[in-house]
Image (tube, rainbow, N blue to C red):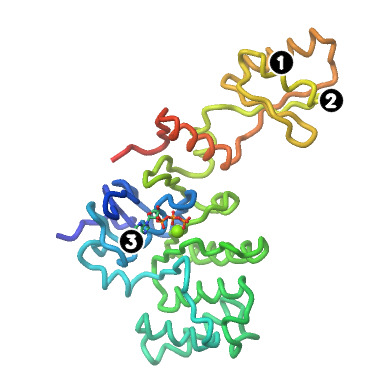
Amino acid sequence: MNMVLNDDIAVKVEKLEKRFGEFTAVNRISFEVRKGEVFGFLGPNGAGKSTTIKMLCGILTPTSGSGSVGGYDINRQQELIKQNIGYMSQRFSLYEDLTVEENIDFYCGIYSVPRELRRERKDWVIRMAGIEPFRTHLTGTISGGWKQRLALGCALIHQPRIVFLDEPTSGVDPIARNNFWSLIKEMAGQGTTVFVTTHYMDEAENCDRLALIYRGDIIAMGRPLELKKECMRETVLRISVPEPEEWIEELEKLESVKEAALFGVMLHAIVKDAQQAKSDIIGLFSRRGVRDYAIEKITASLEDVFVSLIESYDTREGANCGFKKG
Ligand SMILES: Nc1ncnc2c1ncn2[C@@H]1O[C@H](COP(=O)(O)OP(=O)(O)OP(=O)(O)O)[C@@H](O)[C@H]1O
Ligand SMILES: [Mg+2]
């Protein structure tokens, strides 16, 4: 039985599980990705990102659970999925000993691009990736950033409506990464759904929605701003005071301050209750006759949020943010 799909949904999985022997790599995860969305799948090494992507792309068969991609069933219509999506794998997506053009031709074949369209699509890839000067170069000799763009072009050669990118920018310099993200956003703007894995937090900020996967579980899901607002259990106060390093120990003695640390010339205090902590700190400074200080509540970065969620997961407080466990 095929799943009945809401028109707006590009990817949907329910209780998707993958075990390798006794080991559970993906633990009954559920989520949906809407059409035209840039959906980021974040997690540390070994979290289960590639395993999930491979199940969605029809390369790995799930141990249990159900799902659909572009309306096709991930358990029964794997061949149809492969023809209808674009997939840029974490490794080996290009042949280094073929020229740039030969790689494009190869992917035209893999994705069965009709003969009469091949020339046009090849020109499109070359233009989109900006690799005109390297057409006849061996792929192994072009730089990492150009390779990534070529690989993206190859994954898009048959104009798929959904594209899966597994760590597309790993090992690429920040400028090439930025250019790459401009391409991704352009694609999404034209209605393509983008499912992308990364462990770069600054890239995660570019996604419409994120899922954080850790040890096979999705431990948080939401828009980047929502995650920063709602999942951070603690608040960060930034304190400017003369000789900040002298104050770390004193601040940590306050009941309302969990932790204090030096960040450049400022202090960051991690607190549960910002109001309470602020008044305690003001009290401390005034008792010591310090007047020249400033205290400001700052927004936690995505990195702060994820570190905090992973810590709560490991200490089994059970982080649970923006999602319900299946
Ligand atoms: N074919 C396999 N057989 C056994 N274990 C596997 C297999 N493939 C993956 N695993 C294990 O499953 C876990 C998840 O792997 P996966 O490749 O999905 O992680 P990832 O999140 O993509 O990590 P990375 O960021 O390093 O790419 C890892 O512990 C990995 O060793
Ligand atoms: Mg991986």
* Quarter location, residue 268: top right
Distance in Å between CA atoms under marks 2 and 3: 54 Å
For the point 60% across and 51% down, the residue is: 202
Q: Secondary structure at mark 2?
A: loop
What x and y, as percent, mark residue 295? 73, 24
Residue occupying the far top of the picture: 287
Q: Secondary structure at mark 1?
A: helix
Distance in Å between CA atoms under marks 1 and 3: 51 Å
> Mark 3 packing: few (<14 Cα in 10 Å), some, or many (20+)?
many
For the point 47% across and 90% down, the residue is: 119
Q: Amino acid at mark 1?
A: Ile
What x and y, as percent, mark residue 6? 28, 54
User: In the image, is 298 to the left or to the right of 325?
Assistant: right
| Number of the label disc, if any, that sits on residue 243 | 2
Distance in Å between CA atoms under marks 2 and 1: 15 Å
Height in image: 243 above or below 55? above
Q: Earlier in the sequence, mark 2 or mark 3?
A: 3
For the point 40% across and 34% down, the residue is: 320
Q: Secondary structure at mark 3?
A: helix
Read off the residue under disc 3: 56
Nearer the viewer's eye, disc 2 or disc 3?
A: 2
Q: Are marks 2 and 1 in contact (CB under 8 Å)?
A: no
| Number of the label disc, if any, that sits on residue 281 | 1
Nearer the viewer's eye, disc 2 or disc 1?
A: 2
